[in-house]
Amino acid sequence: MNKIWKRALGLNNRGQTLTEFLFVLVILVFLVLAHIQFSLTYVVSSFIRYTTFMAARSESVEVGSSMPYVEAMVGTPGASKLSPVAHILDQAQMTASQKNQFSLPYEVLSYVPLFGPRTEGVLNLKSESPISYEPVAQPLGEFFDNE
C-alpha cells in the first residue's frame, strides 16, 4: 500500500540519479574540452616561441639564415603547419633599431565560439626574441684586435 500512495502523490525518486548524472556529465565534458583547448593553445604558443628563439639564434650566426627555420618549423602565412590551432600572420620580420630583435606575429584560436563570428575566439600575439650578433674581429695592421 505504501508504494501506491507514493506513486499517487508523486513522491517517487526513480529518475533523480539519471538527472544528477546528466548535470555532472555536461560539466565534466565542458571541463575536459576546455583543458584540451588550453593545452593545445599552450603547446602551440610554446612551439612558436621556440621557433622565434631558433630563428634569432641562426640570424646571429649568419645574417639572412632565419627564414628557413621559420618555414620548416611553422610554415608560411598561406600554408601554416599549425593550421587548426594557429596561423602565422605576416612573414617574420626584424624589428627595432639596427635589426636586433626577431619578431613573429601569429594568431591562436583560444576557444571555439559557439555563437557569433570566428574572430571572437582568436588571440593576436607576437613572439619576439633578441638577436645577439657575434663580435667580428677587426684587422689592425698585421694583427687582429682580439689577439
Image: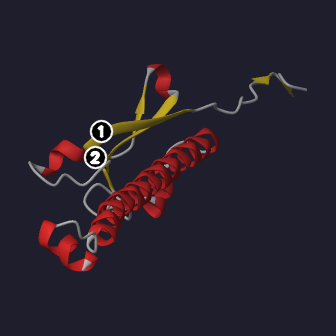
* Front-lying residue, 140 or 20: 20
Figure check: 123 above or below 100: below
How many dots with numbers?
2
Residue 111 screen position, x and y as percent: 29, 51
Q: Name the N-terminal-most of marks 2 and 1.
A: 2
Q: Residue furthest front?
A: 1
Quarter holding the C terminus is top right
Residue at (26, 72) in percent of width and height: 15
Mark sitting on residue 50 = none
Residue 102 screen position, x and y as percent: 48, 36
Residue 51 screen position, x and y as percent: 52, 50
The answer to whether mark 2 and mark 1 are in CB contact below 8 A is: yes
Figure check: 83 above or below 118: below
Gap between marks 2 and 1 measured at Cα: 9 Å
Residue type beneath disc 1: Asn
* Front-lying residue, 26 or 19: 19
* Front-lying residue, 43 or 100: 43
Figure check: 38 above or below 57: below
Quarter holding the N terminus is bottom left
Q: Report helix, strand or loop for mark 2.
A: loop
Identify the residue position indicated by label 2 in the image: 89
Is residue 91 visible to us here? yes
Identify the residue position indicated by label 1 in the image: 124
Residue at (61, 43) in percent of width and height: 57
Residue type beneath disc 2: Leu
Residue at (71, 30) in percent of width and height: 136
